[in-house]
Amino acid sequence: MSNVADELAIRKVVAQYNRAFDYGDPVAWADLFTADGTFCMGGKELAGGKENLLAFANKMVPSMKVKHCTTDAIVEVDGNTASHDAYLILVDTGADKVSVVNSGRYIDTMEKVGGDWKFKSRVVEIDGKM
C-alpha cells in the first residue's frame, strides 16, 4: 500500500472511531484499537487493553449525546506504524439546541495489524473542562 493509501485508510479509521462513539457502538469503538492499545485524556490513561477499552466504551458511549468532528489532520506513515495529529471539535447533540461544547487535539500512534490500521495509543488533549 502506498503512503497515500495508508493515509486515507488511517483517516477512515478516525471517522469510524467518531461514528462508533457517536452512534452508540462500543464494540466497534474498542475494535479500532490494538490488543494492547491505550486511551488517555487529561494526562491519565483511562483504559488500556481490549477488555478495559471495551468496559470504558460500554460506560461512556451510551451516556454521551455528542458528535466528534476532526479536522486539520496530519498523518505521517513509517512502514507499519504511523502518527495522526488532528483537531477535535465536540458538538453536544443531546440538548434542545446543538452547540459546540469543547475542542481539543488528538495525538495518535497507529499500527497496522493484519493489514488494518488501529490505534496503538490515542491521547486526547481537551482545551476546556469536561
Image (spheres, helix red, strand yellow):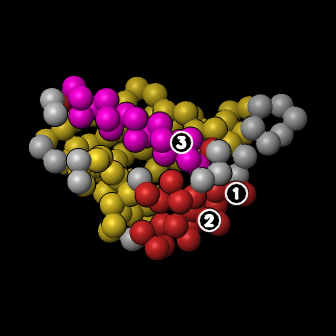
What is the magenta range? 4-21
Classify 10 Å Cα crowding around label 3: few (below 14), some (14-19), many (20 and above). some
Q: Residue furthest right?
A: 96
The alpha-carbon separation of the residues under discs 1 and 2 comes to 7 Å
Where residue 120 sits in the image (x, y, percent)?
31, 57
Q: Badges 1 and 2: C-beta atoms under 8 Å apart?
A: yes
- Mark 3 or mark 2: whose residue is earlier in sequence: 3
Quarter containing the N terminus: top left
Q: Which residue is mark 1?
A: 62
| Any part of residue 105 in sight | no
**In-front residue for pair 74/9:** 9
Q: Which residue is mark 2?
A: 58
| Any part of residue 98 in sight | yes
Could you tell whether 102 is left or right of 30 in the image?
right
**Residue at the (60%, 53%) spot, across then down:** 25
Q: Amino acid at mark 1?
A: Pro
